[in-house]
Image (cartoon, rainbow, N blue to C red):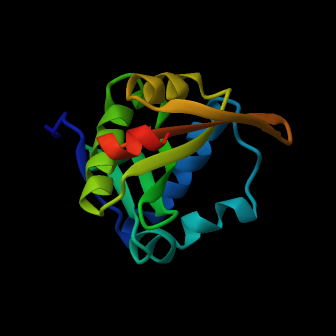
Amino acid sequence: MADARLQIRRFRASDREAVWHLHNVALTTVGAHAGNGAWDDDLHAIETVYLADGGEFLVGTLGGKLVAMGALRRDSADTAELKRMRVLPPYQRRGFGRAILEALEARAVALGYRQLWLDTTTEQTAALGLYAQAGYVETERRHDGQFEIVTMRRALDAAAASEL
């Protein structure tokens, strides 16, 4: 029998197809997919965009199947952007998104980041709830095409919290 616990590890080149599938399915399911375009180029260059530039890209597997993912992208010496948080719809509401988020936050601290920020859409209500529960604070709303975008931030240490 396959292991029923989520296993979190760093992205491997062999994950590329499953990552692309997860990205598309998860966004389509919540009505937040704008179609594929240049804005997806980072997913075709994960090693360069994330792993080789002070970031991270983690995947969560269950019984060998890739079911969750998330990334950190370096923004500045002390700030990283949380990116590409996705969980396959049949595996949502099991704590897998939270597990990826916590692993990324721990990695951000290890990499020396003091704060994280992210953008999500108002269509992604479960993500908004997850981030709020984890201490992320809304800092901006704007429109981009058909979507309302919410920007959120979280300090990873007390000094950074006073700067927010």
> Could you tell me which residue is drawn at 73 percent across and 56 percent down?
36
* Residue 8 located left or right of residue 76: left
Is residue 59 positioned above or below 52 on the image? Answer: above
What is the quadrant of residue 95 in the picture? top left
Is residue 31 positioned above or below 105 on the image? Answer: above
Residue 129 visible: yes
Q: Position of residue 29 (x, y in %)?
A: 62, 31
In the image, 55 versus 5, the foreground residue is 55
Q: Position of residue 32 (x, y in %)?
A: 69, 36
> Could you tell me which residue is drawn at 44 percent across and 26 percent down?
130
In the image, 37 versus 114, the foreground residue is 114
In the image, 156 versus 130, the foreground residue is 156
Residue 67 visible: no
Is residue 55 positioned above or below 108 on the image? Answer: below
Q: Position of residue 60 (x, y in %)?
A: 32, 47
* Residue 64 located left or right of residue 128: left
* Residue 163 located left or right of residue 111: right
Q: Position of residue 106 (x, y in %)?
A: 26, 49
> Could you tell me which residue is drawn at 64 percent across and 29 percent down?
30
